[in-house]
Image (spheres, helix red, strand yellow):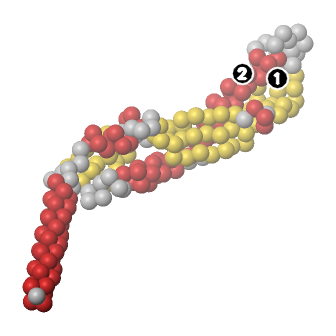
């Protein structure tokens, strides 16, 4: 009776060991095959990147002064003033212009990105201050002149941001951000990022 009990325990343990070994071999082989079979396509990368149409890689605030001189010839029909303001600009790349090439044989992903551009400039209306004001004597709409000055300020701020090196910084940041976005998707691949020239 004791021998039969020991035999059943021995056979049960043997069966469990065999099942464990078989399961380990199966899962090890299966995961290795899945790793070997992993092929990346440019479409899957583009889908990952196209979740946003723009990639903002730099944001900066700027204090500026603009001299506004409206239409007209004298104080009777001409508005003039200096305006100070704060503007915020976003710079980055247009994701719809990103090109992706995948070389599965050499396990390499090549991404070509456009040069960064100023995507948006906003003048904060609450920071606008007027100085040396010379408004028209017969002005029907001073707000129209102020709106024109704000548009002029946004254009001037855009030029200033470009001079400040914001675009170069945004280009470098775009590379770093793209590497971060794709690092999980292309872990086994080499990533090369090429910036388009003008």
Residue at the spot of label 1: 80
Camera sees residue 175? no
Residue 98 placement: quadrant: top left
Residue occupying the far front of the picture:
1
Residue 75 against residue 38 in the figure, above or below = above
Marks 1/2: CA–CA distance: 12 Å
CB contact under 8 Å: marks 1 and 2: no
Query: Pointer 1: residues within 10 angstroms few (<14), some, or many (20+)?
Result: many
Q: Nearer the viewer, residue 60 or 21?
A: 21
Query: Pointer 2: residues within 10 angstroms few (<14), some, or many (20+)?
Result: few
Residue 52 image offset from top left, x and y in percent: 45, 38
Q: Nearer the viewer, residue 23 or 86?
A: 23
At 44% from the left and 35% from the top, the residue drawn is: 53
- Mark nearer the N terminus (1 vs 2): 1
* Left or right, residue 42 beside residue 155: left
At 13% from the left and 85% from the top, the residue drawn is: 5
At 69% from the left and 31% from the top, the residue drawn is: 153
Question: Which numbered circle lies on residue 148?
Answer: 2
């Amino acid at each position: 009776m004791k021998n039969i009990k020991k035999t059943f325990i021995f056979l049960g343990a043997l069966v469990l060991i065999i099942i464990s070994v078989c399961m380990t071999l199966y899962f090890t082989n299966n995961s290795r095959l899945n790793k070997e079979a992993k092929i990346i396509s440019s479409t899957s990368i583009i889908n990952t990147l196209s979740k946003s149409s723009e990639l903002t890689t730099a944001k900066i605030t700027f204090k500026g002064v603009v001299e506004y001189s409206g239409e007209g010839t004298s104080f009777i029909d001409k508005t003039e003033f200096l305006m100070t303001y704060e503007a915020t600009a976003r710079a980055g790349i247009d994701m719809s212009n990103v090109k992706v090439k995948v070389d599965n044989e050499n396990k390499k992903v090549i991404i070509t990105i456009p040069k960064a551009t100023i995507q948006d400039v906003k003048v904060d209306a609450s920071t606008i201050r007027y100085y040396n004001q010379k408004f028209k004597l017969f002005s029907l709409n001073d707000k129209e002149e102020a709106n024109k000055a704000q548009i002029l300020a946004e254009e001037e701020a855009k030029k200033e941001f470009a001079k400040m090196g914001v675009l170069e910084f945004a280009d470098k940041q775009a590379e770093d951000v793209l590497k971060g976005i794709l690092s999980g998707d292309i872990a086994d691949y080499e990533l090369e990022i090429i910036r388009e020239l003008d």
